[in-house]
Amino acid sequence: MANASAASLPEEPGIRIGPLQMRVGVTYKHVLTLFFVSYFGIAMMNSVGIMQAYLFNEILKIPPNEQGSLTGTLLVVQELVVILLVGLAGAISDRVGRPPVFAAGFLLLALGYCLYPLASGDLETVRWELVFFRLFIASGVACVNVMLSSVANDYPVDRTRAKMIAGVFVFNGIGIASLPRLVGGLPQMFIEMGVDPAMAGRYAYWCLAGTCVMLALVLLWGLKPGSMTKSREREPLLATLKVGMAAARMPRVALGYAAAFVSRADLAVVSQFLTLWLVREGMEQGMTPAEATVKATFFYIVIQAFALPWAVVFGVLLDKIDRVKGLMIGMGVAFVGYASLGMLENPLSFEMYIAAAFVGAGEMSANISATSLIGKEAPDRGRGAVLGLFSLFGAVGIMVVGLVGGWLFDNWKPVGPFLYMAGSNALLVVAAVLVYLATRRPGNDRPGDPAVAGA
């Protein structure tokens, strides 16, 4: 992240917004701009997955047995680009300021969304065109992700920084829980206006592009110019990896790395494969791709709607128990959610609401428990390296679920990626139990206690 290698300038209190105390020079306009963009930010990045099923089925006519592997390939490409660019985006923003890099992220998303529905030709040509177009989207995702975190850390004084980040997450969550329904409904809306289905899909993508341009302009107008940090020299990547891998000798840190691999994949499998699966199912039941997309995005919203309040409930629970116990519970809930998807005879039936609730709670539990565990167990010496490697394992987990999930989707059955995640979460529950038993000591079973046994 951008702040990992930055030293904060002296903090002085400025304006106050409710419980949030800002630093000197930060105005109401700066903060409200950040919250406004936070509402749209994650939802705009996730829209590539939400609209992909419609793109494949109605615009590009991708054969059903090729859609899973293509989705996996595009996901791997995106994650590789993000890994390569996040550090660079943060470093550039330290020098030229946050607004230009933040705005550039949304402009790159806009360019990608403009080009994405224009792919044409035979299957192999379309595949390479989509990979090329996805580079723009991936570059935008890298910039937006880094800047959301950086600006949220820049503006408040230290004592209210956690509350500020929580506020940004709330706006992220509200956007994720509301905007996909609108995005998924755009093709059907244009079709009802008399537009050809393929063209309706293109118009939907171009509406996304226009929204991203609007957000870029808002950022350039409303964010505080410049950067509130100054750069320090970065450690070489290989040295960072060496420190992070050495910390893996601690069983709980190693478990945290494994948890990152699984928990980040939990999020990716929902955003990339859920709509693809449900749209195919809807089409097999006689729906048009537009109608199936509306239905699929509704269940996506149900998942996010349960994830948001569950984050509060699980967060309170996690503060009261050992972090490894929390990981057992979190991954166990995720296992139930993904396994329940495999038991549905009709994934568009009422039973899907129950399964979606467990999936939403599960993906949130897995991510909160994994992040909480590594945050507690990472040693003070080399902490940045451990957290960086945690993120790297998460990125690898996303790439693996893209490749394995895509193959299962095409060659086994569409619910395959979710059953793969059910198995992964189950294995992590077993690993957490073993680590807990191996590292437990009398009196050291509370969340606030130091790491034990090998830590």
Image: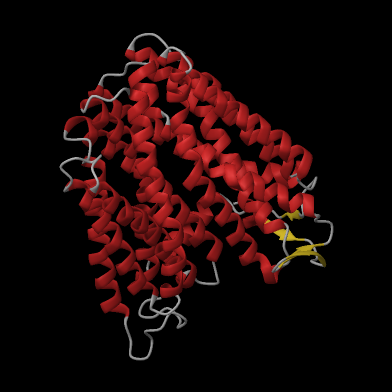
Q: Is residue 339 above or below residue 438?
A: above
Q: In which quadrant will I find the C terminus?
A: bottom left
Left/right placement of residue 443 relative to residue 32 reads left
Q: Position of residue 330 (x, y in %)?
A: 34, 64
Q: Horizontal and vertical percent for residue 281?
A: 24, 32
Residue 257 showing in the rendered view: no
**Residue at 26% over, 30% down:** 282
* Residue drawn where x is 59% and y is 46% of the image: 39
Q: Is residue 108 above or below residue 59?
A: below
Viewer-proximal residue, 136 or 167? 167
- List the single residue furthest toward the bottom: 443
Residue at 51%, 28% in the rendered image: 135
Q: Position of residue 277 (x, y in %)?
A: 28, 35
In screen coordinates, is 176 left or right of 73?
right
In the foreground, 336 or 121: 336
**Residue at image x 64%, y 46%?**
147
